[in-house]
Image (tube, helix red, strand yellow):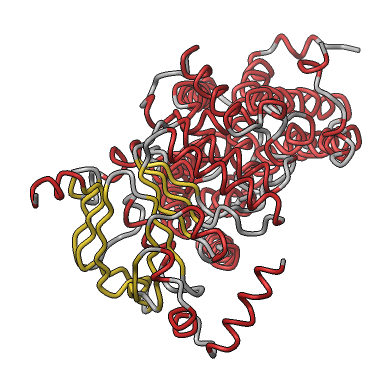
């Protein structure tokens, strides 16, 4: 039973400490994620959510602790080979509208790591790229410059780029931030669909609490660099927990919840 | 018009230098412009200038000094640019002023006539030797060869370093590679175009190309083309009207940028997405 559980674990973080100069971003975080899980990560700004994602794909540097991803112990030297198997959708940034790169080319970047140095994308790679664009519903914009797309469209392209990588792990950092409510629901539906149909393991950082019960198997609550609590969406997202997590009186949390439901 | 002058070897050297230097500068310029780091290029060209003057002062090969000091500047600028968490402009600005200060210090310490030093400042393409042309040829070959071989890595790194990293591309090495190539290109072009003027031949043609195309491959070709064209027109004008060639080249490249900006389809960026692309029209 124990051995079976171990073999099922795709992410195993033990006592991870990360610090940027004098700021400690993670203060001894341990987390285990099983294959096929959909985990939501919530918490106030600066809680260490993004940092948690970056230590899983090896971009964040550990001061202490160990991280095992897809059966490999992460070291400073194997990060970039492991990243080829880990899909990461970072937070949206503004892209210069004059940037000379098309949507299709951006999605192809997802294949570049797998292709390796000195090899050019072939017919098969372009076919995968076009399939992913179809999946996220962006085929009609494939040849547009990336900077001309709206925030929601760029987010879809980022997801397509991540999928073109054919990852085993799917890490998303606030994919619904700064989107209108319709686009939020669409992106969430898309992520959930992809998670199920491709048998991925997904970690989803978000501030959008209303979407968590729909999508997640498990919710991890983070605050000030610690994992503050976790459980099923129902267990984790109680009024009491949210009140302590965001330092707000329970009555305010209840009020906000009502408003959110009304909207 | 008497063009028999183009039969002379010094003129042929100048024409070849302009072609090779133009290709190298135009190619490097694409990185500088798409990464939105024009100031880094300015800083490195002044570092190269300071290094060359150090060489002149202490009596070793000025090009060796130029290359060494521009690489040292890259080693300081690289981590600042790579981190991205803070805007590097202020630190790069400080390094830039330091380089300029060092350059004038070395010039002041240098005994005797300053003509060799001033030549590095303004450049003198008409005195280029076959050796200079060879050096420019090697650098242009290396720059174009590397861009060709690692096109996809350069493209991804220039577009978004963190994204490139997250798909497993060694973006940090590529970024340092770009800075290294910038240093090499500036060093090789220093004698022809001059330390003060070289940067405009890197920035202007690429900035002009940036206004005109949404394809990075086309941008490389246009940028190199504009740089060579600026060089040729500048050279011809400087011969015909008897004005300094380096300055003329820079003014012509600025004029090309001006024309490209006026004609740029990107100024109508708001209207653009509504119109279908030729491929989609069919």
- The residue lying at 53 percent from left, 24 percent from top is A129
* Residue A181 vertical position relative to residue A71 in the rendered view, above or below: below
- Tell me where residue A41 appears, x and y as whole percent: 43, 63
Compared across the picture, whether B228 is left or right of B278 comes to: left
The residue nearer to you, when weighing B95 against B266, is B266
Q: Is residue B59 visible?
A: no
The residue nearer to you, when weighing B111 against B151, is B151
- The residue lying at 90 percent from left, 37 percent from top is B271
**Disc count in the image?**
0
- The residue lying at 50 percent from left, 87 percent from top is A247
- Tell me where residue A176 appears, x and y as whole percent: 60, 55
> Quadrant of the rendered structure where residue A153 is?
top right
- Tell me where residue B180 appears, x and y as whole percent: 45, 41
* Residue A144 vertical position relative to residue B194 in the rendered view, above or below: above
The residue nearer to you, when weighing B62 against A224, is A224
- Tell me where residue A26 appears, x and y as whole percent: 33, 71
Compared across the picture, whether B67 is left or right of A137 comes to: left
Quadrant of image for the C terminus of chain A: bottom right
Q: Is residue A254 visible?
A: yes
The residue nearer to you, when weighing A195 against B210, is A195
* Residue A70 vertical position relative to residue B9 in the rendered view, above or below: below
* Residue A141 vertical position relative to residue B104 in the rendered view, above or below: above
Compared across the picture, whether A75 is left or right of B268 comes to: left
């Amino acid at each position: 039973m124990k051995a079976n559980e171990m073999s099922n674990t795709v992410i195993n973080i033990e006592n991870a400490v990360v610090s940027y100069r004098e700021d400690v971003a993670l203060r001894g975080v341990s987390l285990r994620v099983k294959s096929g899980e959909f985990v939501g990560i919530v918490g106030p700004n600066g809680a260490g959510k993004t940092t948690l994602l970056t230590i899983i794909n090896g971009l964040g540097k550990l001061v202490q602790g160990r991280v095992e991803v897809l059966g490999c112990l992460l070291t400073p030297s194997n990060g970039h080979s492991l990243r080829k198997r880990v899909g990461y959708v970072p937070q949206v940034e503004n892209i210069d509208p004059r940037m000379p790169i098309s949507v299709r080319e951006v999605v192809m970047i997802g294949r570049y790591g797998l292709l390796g140095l000195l090899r050019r994308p072939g017919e098969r790679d372009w076919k995968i790229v076009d399939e992913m664009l179809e999946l996220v519903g962006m085929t009609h914009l494939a040849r547009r410059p990336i900077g001309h797309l709206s925030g929601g469209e760029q987010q879809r392209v980022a997801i397509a780029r991540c999928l073109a990588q054919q990852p085993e792990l799917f890490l998303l950092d606030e994919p619904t931030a700064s989107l209108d409510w319709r686009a939020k629901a669409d992106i969430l539906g898309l992520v959930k669909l992809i998670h199920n149909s491709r048998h991925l393991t997904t970690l989803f950082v978000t501030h959008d609490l209303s979407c968590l019960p729909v999508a997640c198997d498990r919710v991890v609550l983070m605050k000030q660099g610690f994992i503050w609590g976790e459980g099923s969406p129902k267990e984790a997202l109680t009024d009491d927990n949210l009140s302590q997590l965001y330092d707000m009186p329970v009555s305010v949390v209840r009020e906000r919840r009502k408003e959110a439901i009304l909207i | 018009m008497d063009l028999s002058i183009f039969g002379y070897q010094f003129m042929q050297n100048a024409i070849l230098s302009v072609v090779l230097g133009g290709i190298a500068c135009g190619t490097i310029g694409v990185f500088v412009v798409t990464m939105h780091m024009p100031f880094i290029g300015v800083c490195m060209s002044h570092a190269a200038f300071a290094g060359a003057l150090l060489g002149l002062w202490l009596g070793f090969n000025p090009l060796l000094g130029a290359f060494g000091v521009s690489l040292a500047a890259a080693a300081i600028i690289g981590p600042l640019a790579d981190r991205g968490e803070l805007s590097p402009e202020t630190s790069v600005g400080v390094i830039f002023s330091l380089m300029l200060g060092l350059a004038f210090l070395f010039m002041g310490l240098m005994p005797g006539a300053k003509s060799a030093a001033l030549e590095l400042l303004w450049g003198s393409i008409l005195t280029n030797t076959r050796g200079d042309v060879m050096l420019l040829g090697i650098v242009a070959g290396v720059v174009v060869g590397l861009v060709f071989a690692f096109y996809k890595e350069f493209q991804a790194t220039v577009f978004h370093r963190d994204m490139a990293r997250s798909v497993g591309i060694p973006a940090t090495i590529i970024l340092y590679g770009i800075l290294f190539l910038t240093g090499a290109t500036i060093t090789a072009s220093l004698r022809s175009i001059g330390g003060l003027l070289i940067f405009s031949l890197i920035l202007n043609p690429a900035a002009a190309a940036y206004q005109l195309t949404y394809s990075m491959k086309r941008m490389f070709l246009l940028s190199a083309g504009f740089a060579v064209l600026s060089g040729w027109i500048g050279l011809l004008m400087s011969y015909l009207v008897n004005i300094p060639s380096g300055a003329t080249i820079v003014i012509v490249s600025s004029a090309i940028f001006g024309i490209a900006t006026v004609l740029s389809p990107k100024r109508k960026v708001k209207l653009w997405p509504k119109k279908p692309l030729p491929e989609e029209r069919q």
